[in-house]
Image: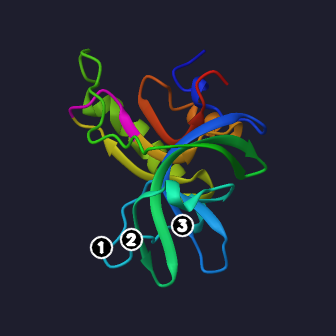
Amino acid sequence: MTAMEHLIVHNGDRIRATAQFVISPTGATTLHGQAAVPLTDPIACSDNLKVPVHGLIPSKLVDGGTTSGNYYGNATIIGTWSDGQIQIEQHLPPDFDAFFPASPATAPHTPAQLAPARAAVEALMRNTENGISMIGGGTGHNQIQVRLLIVTEPIYRRFEPIGSELVDLRPTIVPAPGG
């Protein structure tokens, strides 16, 4: 198994996600993938980074607020991924990383080694269907860090040619421990 394969989510899998959740005035609830948002619109999120969720308990959200009639807050959830939606089974306090985890203590790849990988990831990012919200790293780092919504089998196949040794995928939705 490659360093990326353990991140693949299949239909019917139990998943874990730490994210912002938004409840619209109509009651529709969505998970918002990690993305930079303007201070004036804390729930701004492109459609390719939103996932419909069912079973959210609003009182379990932390750091919540209301904007334009939408209630929002953060949580970690365990649930089931099914046809592009999540059925929530468990709510937990959010476990957002304050900092990126430390990189392994190996010699970094050279800029020349990372440049083609970064260009390939940037090309994938231009296709909104891939759900990529941010990329980082590169010069002076071991890998290109990629923030994305979820790794499904088709998305994994798009990253596979780039190489798991050059790409550090950091999806919002991941397989839950213990399956």
Question: Mark 2 = which residue?
Answer: 42
Amino acid on which disc 3 is placed? Val
* Mark 3 or 2, closer to the camera: 3
Pinpoint residue 31: horizontal percent, then vertical percent. 57, 58
Residue at coordinates 48% horizontally, 50% vertically from top-left?
75
Residue at 67% in and 39% down: 152
Task: Check the image and name the residue furthest to the left.
Answer: 140
Where residue 111 sits, quadrant-wise, is top left
Q: To which residue does mark 1 refer? A: 39
Can you tell which of label 3 and label 1 is closer to the viewer? 3
Q: Which residue is mark 3?
A: 22
Establish if 10 lies above or below 103: below
Callout 1 secondary element: loop
Q: Position of residue 142 (x, y in %)?
A: 30, 26
Vertically, is 93 above or below 131? above
Specify the amino acid type for callout 2.
Pro
Look at the image and give the residue range highlighted in magenta.
140-145
**In this picture, is 6 found above or below 61?**
above
The main secondary structure of the magenta stretch is loop
Amino acid type, mark 1: Leu
Q: How is the image coloured?
A: rainbow
Q: Sequence-wise, which precedes: disc 3 or disc 1?
A: 3
Label for residue 126?
none
Whether residue 33 can be seen here: no
Give left or right: position of 107 versus 13. left
Asked if marks 2 and 1 touch (Cβ < 8 Å), the reply is yes
Q: Please indicate, yes or no, whether residue 73 appears anywhere in the rendered image.
A: yes
Classify residue 145 by image quadrant. Answer: top left
Quadrant that contains the C terminus? top right
Give the quadrant of the N terminus. top right
Q: Report the residue at 29% width, 32% height from top.
A: 112
